Amino acid sequence: MAYQLADGTALGDPSSELRLNPEWTGLPPADLDRPLALESRAGCDTHPVDVTTKAGQLHLSSYVWADMVPRMERLRAAIRLAETDPVQVERADGSEWLERRLAELPEGVLTVVWHSVMWQYASPAQRERGRAALAGAAARATESAPLALLVYEPRRANGNFELLLKLWPAGLSLRLGHGWGHGLPFTWEEQPWG
Ligand SMILES: C[S@@+](CC[C@H](N)C(=O)[O-])C[C@H]1O[C@@H](n2cnc3c(N)ncnc32)[C@H](O)[C@@H]1O
């Protein structure tokens, strides 16, 4: 995936057919050109959609208004990319899934828990269970088996969607920036969180 910035700079993989114009104000506090080695990926959803099937692709496309051409093109490019290297998305509640997946933190890699625009749909009991699973894993995180929480969720206080990052055992807790529900436009603005 590549990020095409307004000033003409491209970050990430310039050969990728998924090219995002992220409409950023500011820049992320990270070197996006630095290659990342992804060891493994896994996900869950209470209602997963298999984007490698025609039915799954139609299902996701039905959420995009037909006249939103750039959004539809982005979705199609993302689907083509997902088809080349699909991720197994398990049918499960996130908190129950996290308990299982975080039971052991692998050595030598950073484990990243990511969720976006789902926390509001979880019940209070599921949220409590999810927080406990994360707190348990955070207490076990070490320098050789670190843990990160990266979330993009709406905040009731200001109506913004915020990108939040916590890192253990480093003890970092940052609000990296804010944007709109579908990710664009986005403003990078680092502040302490929590
Ligand atoms: C608005 S969509 C967001 C999808 C995607 N994360 C994104 O940001 O585009 C919310 C998703 O959360 C899922 N969801 C709701 N409650 C959940 C739970 N307790 N555990 C896991 N997924 C859940 C729904 O099935 C739905 O796919």
Image: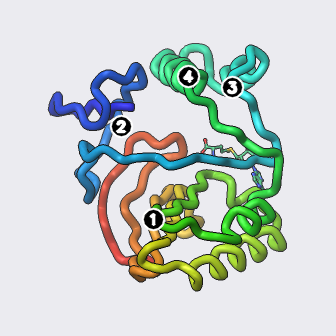
Q: Nearer the viewer, mark 3 or mark 2?
A: 3
Task: Give the class, few, some or many, for how many residues have Cα within 10 Å of label 1's Cα (few <14, many ≥20).
Answer: few
Of labels 3 and 1, earlier in sequence is: 3
Q: Quick one: SS at disc 4? A: helix
Q: Quick one: SS at disc 2? A: loop
Task: Give the class, few, some or many, for how many residues have Cα within 10 Å of label 3's Cα (few <14, many ≥20).
Answer: some
Query: Residue 11, which numbered label?
Result: none
Of labels 1 and 4, earlier in sequence is: 4
Q: Nearer the viewer, mark 4 or mark 2?
A: 4
Q: Are marks 4 and 3 in contact (CB under 8 Å)?
A: no
Query: Which one is in front, 133 or 73?
Result: 133
- The type of colouring in the image is rainbow
Please name the residue that numbered disc 4 is placed on.
Answer: 84
Please name the residue that numbered disc 3 is placed on.
Answer: 51
Please name the residue that numbered disc 1 is placed on.
Answer: 108
Distance between the alpha carbons at the discs numbered 4 and 2: 23 Å
Q: Nearer the viewer, mark 3 or mark 1?
A: 1
Residue in view at x 73 percent, y 49 percent: 44
Distance between the alpha carbons at the discs numbered 2 and 1: 31 Å
Image location of residue 79, percent across then percent down: 58, 23
Q: Amino acid at mark 4?
A: Thr
Image location of residue 128, percent across then percent down: 76, 76
Residue in view at x 75 percent, y 58 percent: 94
Q: Quick one: SS at disc 3? A: loop
Q: Amino acid at mark 1?
A: Gly
Left or right position of 193 against 24: right
Left or right position of 137 against 91: left
**Quick check: is the Cβ at mark 2 less than 8 Å away from ligand 1?**
no
- Residue 22 shows in this picture: yes
